[in-house]
Image (cartoon, rainbow, N blue to C red):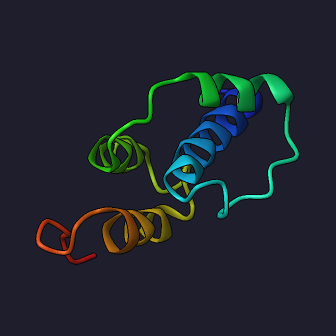
Amino acid sequence: MDEQEWQQENAMLALRLNRHLNGAGLVYRGPAEWSERAQAEPVRPPGDLIAGAEGRTDGELADHANVRRLLTEQLLPSDVAKPV
């Protein structure tokens, strides 16, 4: 994965997460087409976003633990949230 692909994948994950936070979790200043693409997609379930984040290596997603914590603590019902 080259640098631009890495940046785009991380930005798309952040944009998808932000939709669950009603736009309040991210100040996005990247390419407009990425934001537009994320907005045009159906909202993905939090579990799918967790699985996508977990599928990346720690080197590809340095804030992996923070993403998982955000998803499990804030987006998933507490009865299905798994400890980090």
Residue 75 or 9: which is nearer the viewer?
75
Q: Percent x, y for residue 83?
A: 21, 77
Q: Quadrant of residue 69?
A: bottom left
- Give above or below for 23 relative to 74: above
| Image side of residue 45 versus residue 6, left or right | left
Judged from this view, the residue extending furthest toward the front is 22
Residue 29 or 36: which is nearer the viewer?
36
- Give above or below for 2 relative to 51: above
* Residue pictured at 76% horizontal, 29% vertical: 4
Judged from this view, the residue extending furthest toward the left is 79
Q: Percent x, y for residue 3?
A: 74, 34
* Residue pictured at 72% horizontal, 25% vertical: 36
Q: Percent x, y for residue 56?
A: 43, 44
| Image side of residue 51 versus residue 68, left or right | left
How many dots with numbers? 0
> Can you say which quadrant of the picture contains the C terminus?
bottom left
* Residue pictured at 27% horizontal, 48% vertical: 47
> Can you say which quadrant of the picture contains the N terminus?
top right
Residue 56 or 81: which is nearer the viewer?
81
Q: Percent x, y for residue 44?
A: 39, 36
Q: Quadrant of residue 9?
A: top right
- Give above or below for 39 relative to 25: above
* Residue pictured at 69% horizontal, 32% vertical: 8
